[in-house]
Amino acid sequence: MTGGLFERDYTGAPFMLFGREHIIALILVAGICLLVYLFRGFWTEHGMKATRWGLCALIYLCEGSWQVWMWAIGAWTIQGMLPLWLCSVTSWTMPLLLLFRRKWYYEWVYFMGIIGASMALLTPDLVQYGFPHFRFVEFFTLHGAIIVAIVYMTVVEGFRPTGRAIPRVVVITNLFWAFCALVNIKIGSNYLYTQGKLPTPSLLDYLGPHPTYLFWMELIGIGLCLLLYLPFFWLDRKQRRTGDK
């Protein structure tokens, strides 16, 4: 294939954690989110619809092309390619938010989508696939688009999480986690890392051995949910004080 950019055995520069290309990709995602916030009042109804459809198409294109590429290079397996990764679940179900605008789904994806995509962007499991390989571009585009979509629906279209949603999100995510653990035992996979850590450096490396890190993952996940809700808690508190005056 042209330039080896789609090859399985890529001979270009390998991915370097927090190297120049990684930092640039993170800045681009953060910059787009900032622009969405700064220009939140400029969207027309037609523009909102086009943005939702465009983001949905981009996310499906990235996730779908990854599946096709893995099959084309002979690396597709049920142990790694079922839609059981947190970001894969988010990707395939994103029409519930962007096309059907379901509030109950927004509450889940606001917390789990942002947490999952952010962790993936910070510690990508890319091994040898550095920029400009297809896998590098697809990976950062997909996970960046997930975060941009959630930010867009929050600051432009007015969706917002509630504190009451956090227990529901935690319960649903734990049920899905338990389901993945059963699947992993059955087929010898490691979805949601219930059976072991990533083969590449990740935040899990700081959380102790298996299965200790699963307990810390749970606590950190709950803590991150509370942190993501904090801006809205402060906003509600400020509005209540203003209303009492």
Image (spheres, rainbow, N blue to C red):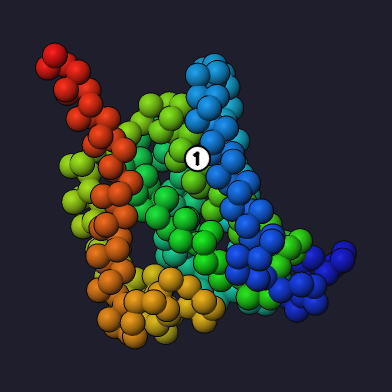
> Badge 1, how many Cα within 10 Å: few under 14, some, many 20+?
many
Q: Nearer the viewer, residue 204 or 64?
A: 204
Q: Is residue 42 left or right of residue 14?
A: left
Q: Residue at x 55, y 18 (%)?
A: 42
Check disc 1 and give the amino acid type. Answer: Ala
Q: Residue at x 75, y 79 (%)?
A: 9
Q: Is residue 36 left or right of residue 191?
A: right
Residue 185 shows in this picture: no
Residue 206 shows in this picture: yes
How many numbered dots are placed on residues in this image? Answer: 1
Q: Residue furthest right?
A: 2
Compared with residue 39, is residue 75 higher up or lower down, i.e. above or below?
below
Tell me residue 94's x, y (percent).
Answer: 46, 45
Q: Residue 204's quadrant in the figure?
A: bottom left
Tell me residue 117's x, y (percent).
Answer: 47, 55
Q: Is residue 149 left or right of residue 65?
A: left
Q: Secondary structure at mark 1?
A: helix
Q: Residue at x 33, y 46 (%)?
A: 228
Q: Residue 104's quadrant in the figure?
A: top left
Q: Nearer the viewer, residue 55 or 144?
A: 144
Tell me residue 164's x, y (percent).
Answer: 18, 42
Q: Nearer the viewer, residue 1 or 110?
A: 110
Q: Which corner quadrant holds the N terminus?
A: bottom right
Compared with residue 191, is residue 243 higher up or lower down, i.e. above or below?
above
Q: Is residue 207 left or right of residue 22?
A: left
Q: Residue at x 27, y 30 (%)?
A: 235
Q: Residue furthest top?
A: 245
Q: Which residue is mark 1?
A: 149
